[in-house]
Amino acid sequence: MKNNLSSFLLISVVAGILACQPATSEQAETDKIADEIEQSLKNNLLDTWYPKAIDKEYGGYYSNFTSDFQVKEQQVKMIVTQSRHLWSNAKAAIRYPEDQHFLVGARHGLAFLKDKMWDKEHGGFYNLVDREGNPLLEREPLKTAYGNSFGIYSLAAYFQATRDSAGLQLAIKAFNWLEEHSYDSVNGGYFQHLQQDGTPAQRGQEVASTSDLGYKDQNSSIHLLEAFSELYTVWKDPLLKQRLEEMLLLVRDKITNEQGNLVLFFERDWRPVSFQSETREVILEHRNLDHVSFGHDVETAYLMIEASHILGHEHDSTTLYTAKKMVDQALELGWDEENGGFYDEGYYFQGSDSLEIIKDTKNWWAQAEGMNSLLLMSRLFPDDEKDYYGKFEKLWNYIDNNLIDHENGDWYSGGLDKQPNLKTADKGNIWKANYHQFRSMANVVDMLRGKSDLI
């Protein structure tokens, strides 16, 4: 059955690629949506953040902004956020070369990563520093594979934009540091939590059952996949290619389960962390470790297809099959049919045949990732009965009406249909910048205009 379905998927992809161009009226509507999203990307998102987010006094980028986009007094700088801002400036410099401040902003970000966030004694990127760049060594974990993955990701993009070898050299150092300290040569994959010297953190008896300390996880794994994909586009290293292939297979065949969703956390030997046999109360207490995350599922569908493409696996029906299954399950179980948008969390409670939505809010990044993957599926499977393109249009309309702040710029952190209070919530923090929105919107515009390498 699986082989037959894989053959069908491959035929569908080929048919989609060879399909005729849309009729003139349809093309006009497609162009209209592309123009709307491009304008929102440039004028509402990027021009709101930059150059305002550049910390000219201490280096790097500001993290915290109020609802009307004023810089807050308290600032902590995280490797993830700093890297995402560097990535955004680098990609914006490529996309909008007429705006020189993006290139300036990218060089500014590189200097902070190199001079302040990289541990010159032990190697690796610190997880957190204060505004001035002093490492916050009392905050656990000191280093993560997740944070270092975004360092690699941004530095590869920086090299693409500038051809400055300093960026590539630091990306390679970070990759080699992960290889030495975080890579699990016995069970595969990477340890997420690391001490300052790179030693993987142990999950001792004193660690709370609700903590993820010491576990392997899907989130660092999918972003290592993404980072290695970005790095491989500029550095064709054999070991890097091997690790990229390993991560694709790990994410696709082990972290993604048969139902089509990601398992969130694992023991060191990749045994899933599950509370399904516990009481409802215990399950909900540990929901951060064990639930269905529709946003991560649709995001990973894209990241797997991207990695397969970068590796040159143009007819990889197994990856396409898994990616489609992930998006289809998210649409079937986590999609708001009435208003559009993907819910945040679901759970398969023991004894029930169906998934229950346990968190019906709609965070910003999941909607951005969903828009990207829905349009990609519509291009790969244009005749599918799920009407991916129609749902893409509905999701863009939802985003435009419930997430984009047309007055102050950027996106709210969650859909106002579910959380109207977020209209006055902070726009920026160490976990919220603009990477998800930028990547999705740029990809969508390129697909709509026929400029994407993936289709």
Image: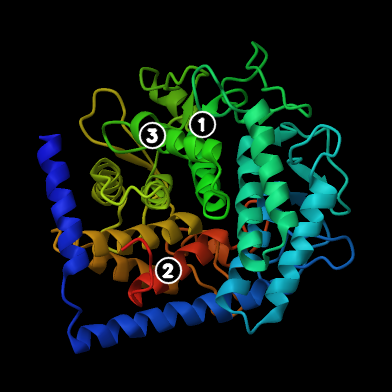
Amino acid carrying mark 3 in the image: Leu
As drawn, is 267 to the left or to the right of 275? Answer: right
Disc 2 or 3, which lies upstream in sequence?
3
Tell which of 431 and 32 is nearer to you: 32
**Can residue 399 be seen at all in this image of the molecule?**
yes
As drawn, is 378 to the left or to the right of 296? Answer: left
Asked if 42 appears above or below 216 in the picture, the reply is: below
- Between circles 1 and 3, the one closer to the viewer is 3
As drawn, is 233 to the left or to the right of 167? Answer: left
Tell which of 372 and 17 is nearer to you: 17
User: Residue at image x 64%, y 10%?
Assistant: 205
> Can you give x and y, in whole percent of width and height, for residue 58 in the image?
88, 60
As drawn, is 96 to the left or to the right of 198? Answer: left
Element type at mark 1: strand
Q: CA distance from mark 1 to mark 2?
A: 29 Å
Given the current orientation, which residue lies at the most extreme top position?
205
User: 10 Å neighbourhood of mark 2: few (<14), some, or many (≥20)?
Assistant: many
Q: Specify the quadrant of the image occupied by residue 173.
A: top right
Q: Are marks 2 and 3 in contact (CB under 8 Å)?
A: no
Asked if 160 appears above or below 226 in the picture, the reply is: below
User: Residue at image x 81%, y 55%?
Assistant: 112
Label 3 sits on residue = 249
Label 1 sits on residue = 217
- Between circles 1 and 2, the one closer to the viewer is 1
Looking at the rendered image, the quarter that the N terminus falls into is top left
Amino acid carrying mark 2 in the image: Ile
> Can you give x and y, in whole percent of width and height, for residue 366 in the image?
44, 54
Element type at mark 2: helix
Q: CA distance from mark 2 to mark 3?
A: 33 Å
User: Residue at image x 47%, y 70%?
Assistant: 442
Label 2 sits on residue = 399
